C-alpha cells in the first residue's frame, strides 16, 4: 500500500509491478499531467522574448545584434537556474516546488508587462529578459520529479511526454503571438493572457500533485553525478539535441526577419511550426529509445540532423526561402526526436553501471534513480547552454557575413562531433567505459551501454 500523509507519499516502489498496477501508475500519471502543465507554461515564459522581439520594430531602437544578445542572455539564465531547480525537488518536495516555481513565473511576466513599450532602454529590456530565464528551470525540477515516479521500463515514455508537453509551450506562445499580431494587438495583450494561466497552474499543482518522501536531499548524489564522466558526456550530447531545439526556437523568427526580410506577421506564421512538431515528436523519441535503445536512435538522429543542416547551408547560400523553411522545420523535428532518446539514455546508463557493480533488484533501481535524478539537472543545464551558443553564433554570423550561413557551418561540425562521441562511448564494440576512479581496470572493457 502507498502510505500517505497530507500531500506526502511515504512509500514508493514503482519497480514492484503489483504496487505499480494497483495504485502506483494512477498516482504517477496524475502527477505527470500537472507537472506537464506547469512546465509547459514555464517554457512559454522562458521563450516569450523570442516573440516579444518580433513586436519590437524600429521605434524600439534595437538592432538585430541587440535582439540576438537579449535572447542569448535569457537562454543563459534558463540554463543556469536548472541546477538549483533540480535539487529543490528533494529539498521542498516535488509538489511543493512545482507550486513555488509556477508562482515565480508571475515575476518576469508582470515585469515585462510594465516595461514593454518604445522608449524603454536596452539595459532595462535586458534586465527584465533575464528574469524570464527562471522559466527554463521548471524543466529540470519537473524531469527530476517525474523520473522518481516511474519505473525504468516506462521512463523513456514518461520523460519524453513530460519534456514534450513542456517544450510545446514554445510554439503555443508563438501561436498566441501570431493571433494577437494578426488581430492588431500588442505585446501586453500576450502577457495579459499568461498571467492568469500561471495562477491556475500553481493552484492545480497544489490541489492534485504529491511529494515523494523517498526523494531525499542527497548532496552526495550530486557530487557523485558531477564526478561521473557520463554526466558530462551526456551533457555534451544534450547540447546537440535540446540546445539546438531551444536555440533555434529563440532564433528562427529573427533569422527569417533579418535574412529573408520577413515582416513580424510573416515570420510568426511559420516560426511556431518547427517548435510544435519538435515538441510533439519528443515522446516518440523516448518510445523508440525504449524499444531500440537510446544510443542507437541518438546516433542516427545526429546523422539526420547533419544532413538537414547541410541543406540549410545550401538554402541559405541560394537564398531559397521555401527550401530554408522546410529544412529548418525538419531540423526541429529531429531535435525533438533526439531530446527524447538522449534523456532515455540517462537512467539506462546508470542502471547498467549498477548491474556491472553487482547490484540487482531494488538496490540497482535505487542506485539508478539516485544518480540519474542528480545528473539530470546538470545535463539539462549544460544542454541548454547550447541555446546560448546558437544565438551568439547567429549574432556573430550576421555581423560578419550578413546571413546565418556561417553559423550553420559551425552547427554541422558540432553534430559530426556528437555523432562520433555517441558511437565511440555507447555503441563501439567492445564498449569501453570512460575513466572512473572507483572501477578496476579489468572491469572497464566488460561494461556495455549498447542497449541504453
Image (cartoon, helix red, strand yellow):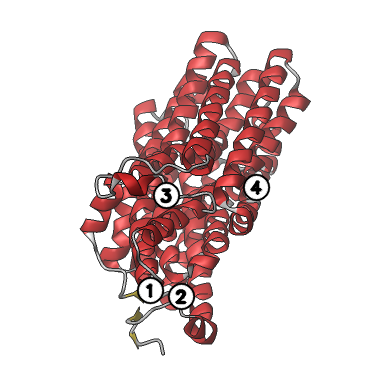
Q: Disc 4 and disc 3: Cα gap in Å?
A: 41 Å
Q: Quadrant of the N terminus?
A: bottom left
Label disc, if present, on residue 446 of the rendered structure: 3
Q: Disc 2 and disc 3: Cα gap in Å?
A: 26 Å
- Lower position in the chain sequence, tag 1 or tag 4: 4
Mark 4 vs mark 3, foreground winner is: 3
Mark 1 vs mark 4, foreground winner is: 1
Confirm whether residue 286 shows in the render: yes
- Lower position in the chain sequence, tag 2 or tag 3: 2
Disc 1 target residue? 362
* Furthest residue in direction front, as rendered: 442
* Furthest residue in direction left, as rendered: 220
Q: Residues within 10 Å of mark 2 (few under 14, many from 20)?
A: some
- Lower position in the chain sequence, tag 2 or tag 1: 2
Q: Residues within 10 Å of mark 3 (few under 14, many from 20)?
A: few
Q: Disc 2 and disc 1: Cα gap in Å?
A: 7 Å
Q: Disc 2 and disc 4: Cα gap in Å?
A: 33 Å
Amino acid at each position: 500500500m502507498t502510505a500517505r500523509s497530507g500531500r506526502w507519499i511515504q512509500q514508493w516502489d514503482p519497480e514492484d509491478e503489483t504496487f505499480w498496477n494497483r495504485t502506483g501508475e494512477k498516482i504517477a500519471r496524475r502527477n505527470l499531467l500537472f507537472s506537464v502543465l506547469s512546465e509547459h507554461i514555464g517554457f512559454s515564459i522562458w521563450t516569450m522574448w523570442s516573440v516579444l522581439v518580433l513586436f519590437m520594430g524600429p521605434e524600439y531602437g534595437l538592432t538585430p545584434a541587440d535582439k540576438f544578445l537579449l535572447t542569448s542572455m535569457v537562454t543563459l539564465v534558463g540554463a543556469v537556474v536548472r541546477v538549483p531547480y533540480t535539487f529543490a525537488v528533494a529539498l521542498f518536495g516535488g509538489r511543493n516546488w512545482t507550486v513555488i516555481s509556477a508562482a515565480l513565473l508571475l515575476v518576469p511576466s508582470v515585469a515585462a508587462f510594465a516595461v514593454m513599450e518604445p522608449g524603454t532602454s536596452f539595459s532595462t529590456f535586458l534586465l527584465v529578459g533575464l528574469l524570464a530565464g527562471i522559466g527554463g528551470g521548471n524543466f529540470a525540477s519537473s524531469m527530476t520529479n517525474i523520473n522518481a515516479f516511474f519505473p525504468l521500463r516506462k521512463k523513456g515514455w514518461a520523460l519524453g511526454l513530460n519534456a514534450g508537453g513542456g517544450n510545446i509551450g514554445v510554439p503555443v506562445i508563438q501561436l498566441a503571438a501570431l493571433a494577437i499580431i494578426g488581430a492588431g494587438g500588442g505585446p501586453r495583450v500576450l502577457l495579459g493572457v499568461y498571467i492568469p494561466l500561471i495562477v491556475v497552474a500553481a493552484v492545480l499543482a497544489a490541489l492534485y500533485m504529491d511529494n515523494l518522501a523517498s526523494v531525499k536531499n542527497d548532496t552526495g548524489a550530486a557530487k557523485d553525478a558531477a564526478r561521473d564522466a557520463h554526466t558530462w558526456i551526456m551533457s555534451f550530447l544534450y547540447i546537440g539535441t535540446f540546445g539546438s531545439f531551444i536555440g533555434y526556437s529563440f532564433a528562427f523568427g529573427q533569422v527569417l526577419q533579418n535574412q529573408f526580410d520577413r515582416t513580424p506577421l510573416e515570420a510568426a506564421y511559420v516560426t511556431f511550426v518547427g517548435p510544435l512538431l519538435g515538441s510533439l515528436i519528443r515522446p516518440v523519441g523516448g518510445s523508440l529509445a525504449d524499444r531500440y535503445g537510446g544510443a542507437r536512435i541518438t546516433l542516427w538522429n545526429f546523422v539526420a540532423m547533419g544532413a538537414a543542416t547541410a541543406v540549410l547551408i545550401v538554402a541559405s547560400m541560394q537564398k531559397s526561402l521555401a527550401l530554408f523553411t522546410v529544412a529548418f522545420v525538419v531540423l526541429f523535428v529531429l531535435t525533438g526526436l533526439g531530446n527524447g532518446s538522449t534523456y532515455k539514455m540517462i537512467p539506462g546508463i546508470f542502471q547498467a553501471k549498477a548491474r556491472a557493480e553487482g547490484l540487482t533488484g531494488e538496490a540497482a533501481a535505487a542506485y539508478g534513480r539516485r544518480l540519474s535524478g542528480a545528473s539530470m539537472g546538470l545535463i539539462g543545464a549544460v544542454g541548454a547552454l547550447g541555446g546560448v551558443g546558437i544565438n551568439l553564433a547567429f549574432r556573430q554570423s550576421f555581423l560578419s557575413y550578413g546571413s546565418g550561413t556561417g553559423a550553420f557551418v559551425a552547427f554541422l561540425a558540432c553534430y559530426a562531433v556528437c555523432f562520433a562521441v555517441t558511437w565511440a562511448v555507447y555503441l563501439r564494440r567492445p564498449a569501453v567505459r570512460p575513466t572512473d576512479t572507483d572501477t578496476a581496470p579489468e572491469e572497464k572493457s566488460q561494461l556495455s551501454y549498447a542497449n541504453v
